[in-house]
Image (cartoon, rainbow, N blue to C red):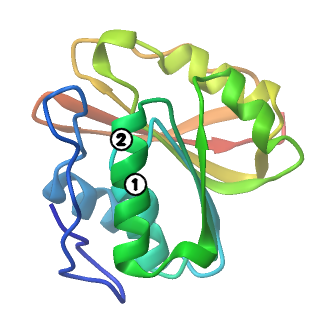
Amino acid sequence: MRIVGGEARGRSLRAVPGDATRPTADRVRQSLFDALGHRMDGLAVLDLYAGTGALALEALSRGAARAVLVENDARACGVIFHNIAALRYDDRCRVVRGELPAALAQVRGERFDLVFSDPPYALRAGTQTLQALVGHEVLAPAARVVLERDRREPAPEVPQGLEQVDERSYGDTRVAVYVRSAK
């Protein structure tokens, strides 16, 4: 696993041992950032179910200003801290250890331009995650939310305040992009 674009392109990332964490494949990450735009200049990023931190770290490599990574698993948090230090992004990252949606209380008052959510497929947490993001008011105006889910999982219910603008499939993975709407 590696960073696929930006200033840290080609740098390796450590993976979480075992199969409890399913990192986003390099090719899916590349396609996702192609769709989002290669540059993330100045964005505030929130990475939910962060795993290895690859999505947030990719955004930082492409110019995001800061990132908050939320992860509940202790081993995954250790890997995230290692990957942040290896890329020297310590001053631009914060790790929040906790379970969603309760962990969002720790970022109350902050606003994010780009949110990644890649929950374990077994959780089927799409609807709950989207509702929590809107309910905790962490989305900046025109924020984008990227939600990964198993292709067999039904589409999540989209709460008022979000609008789906894109969806793509990559093997067993579906990636939907939502934008904060004025509704």
Sort mark 1 into few (<14), some (14-19) or many (20+) by Cα contacts within 10 Å. many
How many marks do you count on the picture?
A: 2
SS at mark 1? helix
Above or below for 70 versus 112: above
Disc 1 residue type?
Answer: Ile
Sort mark 2 into few (<14), some (14-19) or many (20+) by Cα contacts within 10 Å. many
Left or right placement of residue 114 versus residue 28 in this view? right
Q: Position of residue 91 (x, y in %)?
A: 62, 77
| Residue appearing at x 21%, y 32% in the figure | 173
Q: Is residue 161 visible?
A: no
| Residue appearing at x 85%, y 40% in the figure | 108
Return the residue nearer the eye: 118 or 127. Answer: 118
Q: Position of residue 93 (x, y in %)?
A: 59, 65
Disc 2 residue type?
Answer: Ala
SS at mark 2? helix
Return the residue nearer the eye: 131 or 12. Answer: 12
Left or right placement of residue 13 versus residue 131 in this view? left
Work out how far the residue at label 2 is from the one at label 1, CA to CA, in angstroms: 6 Å
| Residue appearing at x 71%, y 43% in the figure | 180
Q: Is residue 84 visible?
A: yes
Above or below for 12 versus 181: below
Residue farthest to the left, as pictured:
171
Q: Are marks 2 and 1 in contact (CB under 8 Å)?
A: yes
Return the residue nearer the eye: 79 or 174. Answer: 79
Left or right placement of residue 149 versus residue 26 in this view? right
Above or below for 138 versus 8: above
Give the residue at mark 2: 76
Q: Position of residue 96 (x, y in %)?
A: 62, 43
Q: Quadrant of residue 3?
A: bottom left
Which quadrant would the N terminus be assigned to in this image? bottom left
Q: Residue 80, labelled with which disc?
A: 1
Q: Residue 135, labelled with which disc?
A: none
